[in-house]
Amino acid sequence: MLTYRTNLLLSEQDHQMLVQVANKKGATMGEVIRAALKKVYKLSKQSTSLSATLTKIDKIARKVKTKDINYQELISYGRRF
């Protein structure tokens, strides 16, 4: 549902281009503008989900205690395989 109205000032060249694109696609100028906004600026659910996941991983990683880890022992153990 469309709930907001916005006025947009365009140069003559931009307006002609918008009219041509709308005619070619069989869409209104508003539909072309809305599609362009979504394509260029809207974050996908996947990227939002990825961001949230990375934030959770960072919070968990900050709680991990690494002070008393013997890294040389871990490296030696890992080389056996």
Image (cartoon, rainbow, N blue to C red):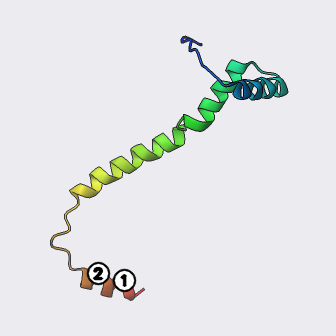
In the rendered structure, are the residues bearing label 2 and label 1 in contact, judged by CB atoms less than 8 Å apart?
yes
Quadrant of the rendering where the C terminus is positioned: bottom left
Q: Write down the quadrant of residue 76 in the picture.
A: bottom left
Quadrant of the rendering where the N terminus is positioned: top right
Q: Position of residue 38 (x, y in %)?
A: 60, 31
Q: Write down the quadrant of residue 20 in the picture.
A: top right
- Up the image or down, 55 lies above or below 10; here it is below
Return the residue nearer the eye: 10 or 40: 10
Q: In this figure, which residue is indicated by the disc labeled 2? A: 74
Q: In this figure, which residue is indicated by the disc labeled 1? A: 78
Of the residues shown, which amino acid type is indicated by label 2? Leu
Q: At numbered mark 2, what does the secondary structure look like: helix, strand or loop?
A: helix
Distance Cα–Cα, label 2 vs label 1? 6 Å
Position of residue 44 in the picture relative to residue 27 (left or right)? left
Q: At numbered mark 1, what does the secondary structure look like: helix, strand or loop?
A: helix
* Residue at x 28%, y 53% (from the top left corner): 60
Q: How many neighbours does mark 2 have within 10 angstroms: few (below 14), some (14-19), or many (20 or more)?
A: few
Return the residue nearer the eye: 29 or 56: 29
Q: How many neighbours does mark 1 have within 10 angstroms: few (below 14), some (14-19), or many (20 or more)?
A: few
Position of residue 4 in the picture relative to residue 58 (left or right)? right
Return the residue nearer the eye: 15 or 32: 15
* Residue at x 78%, y 24% (from the top left corner): 22
